[in-house]
Image (cartoon, rainbow, N blue to C red):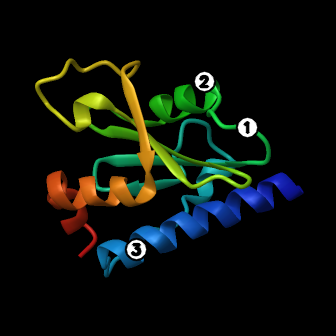
Amino acid sequence: MTNSRNKGASFEREIANIINESLGLKKPLKRILEQTREKHLPDLILGKWFLECKRYGQGAEPLESWWDQVIKATPEDSYPALIYKFNHRPIKVRIPIHTINKNLPLDFNNTCDFSLESFIVLLKSLYKEDIETHL
């Protein structure tokens, strides 16, 4: 495994641990190990949320290809989330805006980015059924 793979796997475990602890999950999120062999699998799954985690050195904005990757890994009737971090910057989450307000159009090109803490608040507030699948 290369250093970048180790860094990616470490970040996936870090995110899983933060979400597990923050949501009090009894069935903890675990890395999907098949993702290294099979295309179109996310890093983590929480209910209907398909999470792709990216850790990168320099930058401020995620690559478009990262968002495309998580969309391809997300089945119909589920929700994509890109969790990313650059050096010396906080962890951010990108999601489609319709996951915040169902009155907004279903379009994966309309997104918003916010902190991991805010994403956890969103899950606790609007997506309790997805949390319950891990309790």
Whichever of callouts 1 and 2 sits on the residue coming sooner in the sequence is: 1
Give the residue type that dot 2 points to: Glu
Q: Is residue 135 above or below residue 83?
A: below
Q: Residue furthest right?
A: 2
Q: Residue at x 68, y 47 (%)?
A: 37
Label 3 element class: helix
The residue wearing badge 1 is 59
Indicate which disc, 1 or 3, sits on the residue closer to the N terminus. 3
| Point 23% across, 29% down: residue | 98
Mark 1 or mark 2, which is nearer to you?
Answer: 1
> Which disc, if any, is residue 20?
3
Q: Helix, strand or loop at disc 2?
A: helix
Question: Residue 86: x, y in percent?
Answer: 69, 48
- The answer to whether any part of residue 28 appears in the image is no
Q: Is residue 95 left or right of residue 42?
A: left
Q: Is residue 117 visible?
A: yes
Q: Residues within 10 Å of mark 1 (few under 14, many from 20)?
A: few
Q: Which residue is mark 2?
A: 64
- Decide which of tag 3 and tag 2 comes sooner along the chain: 3
Question: What is the distance, in whole Å, between disc 1 and disc 3 at their CAs?
Answer: 28 Å
Describe residue 7's horizontal placement relative to residue 68 as left or right.
right
* Dot 1: element: loop
Check if mark 3's residue and mark 2's residue have beta carbons within 8 Å. no
- What residue is drawn where x is 13% and y is 30%? 102
Look at label 3 and name its amino acid: Asn
Q: Quick one: label 3, few (<14), some, or many (20+) residues within 10 Å?
A: some
Q: How many marks?
A: 3
Nearest the viewer among 63 and 59 is: 59
Is residue 27 left or right of 88 when viewed as pictured? left
Q: Amino acid at mark 1?
A: Gly
> Image quarter for residue 103?
top left
